[in-house]
Amino acid sequence: MSNKFFSLDEIKDKLQVPEQADFIEAFFNWQISKWQFARENYTALESVKVKRFNFPDTSVLVQYNPHRVGSIMALTDEKSIANRKCFLCNENLHAEQVGVKLTENYTLLVNPFPVISIHFTAKFNSHVPQKISENLIEILNGAQTLGDNYFLLYNGPEAGASVPEHRHFQGGAKNKLPFLKDIITKIENRYKANSDLTLMDVLDFKQTKLFAVQDEIRNYFVITGVNASEIEEMFFNLFNVFTSLFGAEKEIKLNLISTVEKGKHYLVIFPRAKHHPSCFFEEGEKQLLVRPSTLDIGGIIVLPREEDFNKITKEKIKEIFSEVGISNDDFKHIISEVKKH
Ligand SMILES: [Zn+2]
């Protein structure tokens, strides 16, 4: 054991976390107490400006967060990647940064550029490119280890990842992502209450279910179940349909959120049509710097420029989501294809 990396048991012992307590939060607080740079950024996050936009069946928070400009503007072409130091590689971590073993191949770190008040990065233990088809089981296992209060997310290499050269997930406190709580409640209460939300039961496989969901701004899928390998099988059924429909040089564009509640996995899958909306490339008044990643698609839009925060409207949000998400026709097509398998 080095003094930078710990197993879960070592961290529980070291911080004397009681059996039933939230050891993830204890780890977070301990890291923040020792790392001034990150602590200052978490303190700054408390005073960022936030606006809320309500849609009939969902809501979106917009955050003005200048600290995220590096991530949103990060260049992800081969040349830029080759010319920079990878800040997820062990030798480039901050001196104060410590890690906890989350799964077989992933280490949990505190994210020093937060969007939510408890924000993690889970990095792969070696420098290999972002690719979910080789690691789906680890996002499921990692979410299980984090427990009911947290989630993990995945940004595809062409769907929001700012460091696609080093495989990673992000993680955070579930109560900071209202969308996730809402969709779990809607799925669990689907036979009880009327909802504006369109929730379609697409497939059942043993104990695993696939839902297709349409709300005012998004078309997406949710897989639920208690058995990780069944969920994997269901996911790849969907993944293969996406790939045959859209094709991809690296990987089809997608965002994932994985969480566990009362022993049940919830894997949310947002297929994407585009990485950047057209307003990203506009000039002057028409430009709006937004490059949606999983958190944005999950209802926390991060804008690094105050002028964009001031001018964004509900209509613009709908337009951005419809541009970067998949069309209703593609959504219907995927549903019919996936049923054939
Ligand atoms: Zn690296």
Image (tube, rainbow, N blue to C red):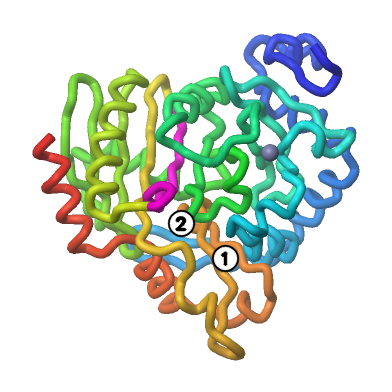
Find disc 2 in the rendering and name its residue.
297
Callout 1, which amino acid?
Answer: Val
Q: Nearer the viewer, residue 206 or 75?
A: 75
Q: Which mark is residue 147?
A: none
* Residue at the image position 16 percent from the left and 41 percent from the top: 338
Front disc: 1 or 2:
2
Along the polypeptide, which appears first: circle 1 or circle 2?
1
Let me know if residue 18 is in the magenta part.
no
For label 1, the crowd category at 10 Å Cα-Cα, with few meaning under 14, some 14 to 19 and many 20 or more, is some
Q: Nearer the viewer, residue 332 or 116?
A: 332
Q: What percent of the width, then of the height, locates residue 101?
A: 66, 20
Q: Nearer the viewer, residue 242 or 24?
A: 242
Mark 1 to mark 2 CA distance (whole Å): 11 Å
Q: What percent of the width, then of the height, locates residue 139?
A: 48, 30
Horizontal relation, residue 107 to residue 35: left or right: left
* Residue at the image position 58 percent from the left and 87 percent from the top: 283
Horizontal relation, residue 156 to residue 108: left or right: left
Instruction: Answer above or below: position of 330 versus 182.
Output: below
Res 172 seen here: no
Q: What percent of the width, then of the height, locates residue 222?
A: 31, 40
Q: Nearer the viewer, residue 241 or 180?
A: 241
**Local SS, label 2:** helix
Q: Quadrant of the C terminus?
A: top left
Instruction: Answer above or below: position of 292 versus 120.
Output: below
* Residue at the image position 54 percent from the left and 75 percent from the top: 280
**Local SS, label 1:** strand
Instruction: Answer above or below: position of 144 versus 150.
Output: above
Residue 241 figure quarter: top left
Res 178 seen here: yes
Find disc 1 in the rendering and name its residue.
62
Q: Which residues are magenta?
A: 249-260
Disc 1 CB within 8 Å of nearest ligand 1 atom: no
